[in-house]
Image (spheres, grey):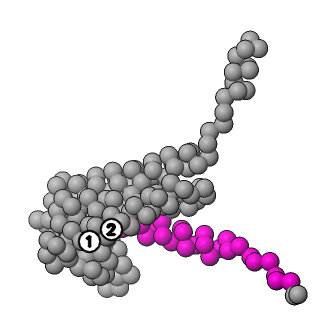
Amino acid sequence: MAEASAAVERRPLPNPLRVNRTFGLGIAIAILVLDQAVKWIVTYILQLRDRQEIVWLPFFQLNWVPNYGVSMGFLTANGETQRWLLVGLTAAISIFVFAWLWREKRRDDVIALGLVLGGALGNILDRVRLGYVVDYADLHFGSWRPFLVFNLGDAAITIGVLLLLLRALLTRERKAPREKV
């Protein structure tokens, strides 16, 4: 009996950095899979490409919008070369986010980075497979549209970036006052 309790005591505690990595990558994979599943449902089951529009609520509808750019028409790819340059640029950004997530110690930042990485990977996968990103969610209030048509990956990226900005603004480290010499 003493040997069993000694074995339990000798077992090392899990590495917090490894736990965070696993958690963040798990979030990224979950967002990637969910993003692709919803895009598949919208495209093939709801046949939004053929129907173009499905009104669900007075403030929310599905609209088929193939997005050849990054955001708000910025960096629109008008040809194959531009498409692959855009894939390369967004892949480089994703690698940066992955590296940041890999080294990050703060759990809240790991969650935010996992959201950004998963959303970015979903959009990259669309651009590689289709040549464009499938956007479908149209949130509006009457004729006022606070957002462009977006997808789950876009929402995850936006939420992740907002969480990172919010944490950075709210938890600024205060510098100690300088001593006069």
The kind of residue on which mark 2 rests is: Thr
Q: What element carries label 2?
A: helix
User: In the figure, is residue 164 to the left or right of 139?
Assistant: right
Please tell me how crowded label 2 is: few (under 14), some (14-19), or many (20+) other residues with Cα within 10 Å: some
| The image quarter in which residue 31 lies | bottom left
Q: Where is residue 139 in the image (x, y as percent from the top left)?
A: 35, 74
Quadrant location of the C terminus? bottom right
Q: Can residue 53 be seen in this view?
A: no
175 vs 47: above or below:
below
Q: Is residue 177 magenta?
A: yes
Residue farthest bottom in this picture: 180
| The image quarter in which residue 35 lies | bottom left
145 or 70: nearer the eye? 70
Q: Where is residue 169 in the image (x, y as percent from the top left)?
A: 62, 76
82 vs 125: above or below:
below
30 vs 151: above or below:
above
Which residue is the site of mark 2?
Answer: 90
- Which mark is on residue 107? none
User: In the figure, is residue 80 to the left or right of 32?
Assistant: left
Q: Does the magenta stretch include residue 34?
A: no
Give me the C-alpha separation between circle 2 and circle 1: 6 Å
48 or 129: nearer the eye? 129
Q: Where is residue 18 in the image (x, y as percent from the top left)?
A: 55, 45
Residue interval drawn in magenta: 150-179
Which residue is the site of mark 1?
Answer: 86
| Residue found 66% across the figure and 36% down from its top | 13
Q: Is mark 1 on a helix, strand or loop?
A: helix
Query: CB atoms at circles 2 and 1 under 8 Å apart?
Result: yes
| The image quarter in which residue 168 lies | bottom right
Please tell me how crowded label 1 is: few (under 14), some (14-19), or many (20+) other residues with Cα within 10 Å: many
The kind of residue on which mark 1 rests is: Leu
57 or 14: nearer the eye? 14
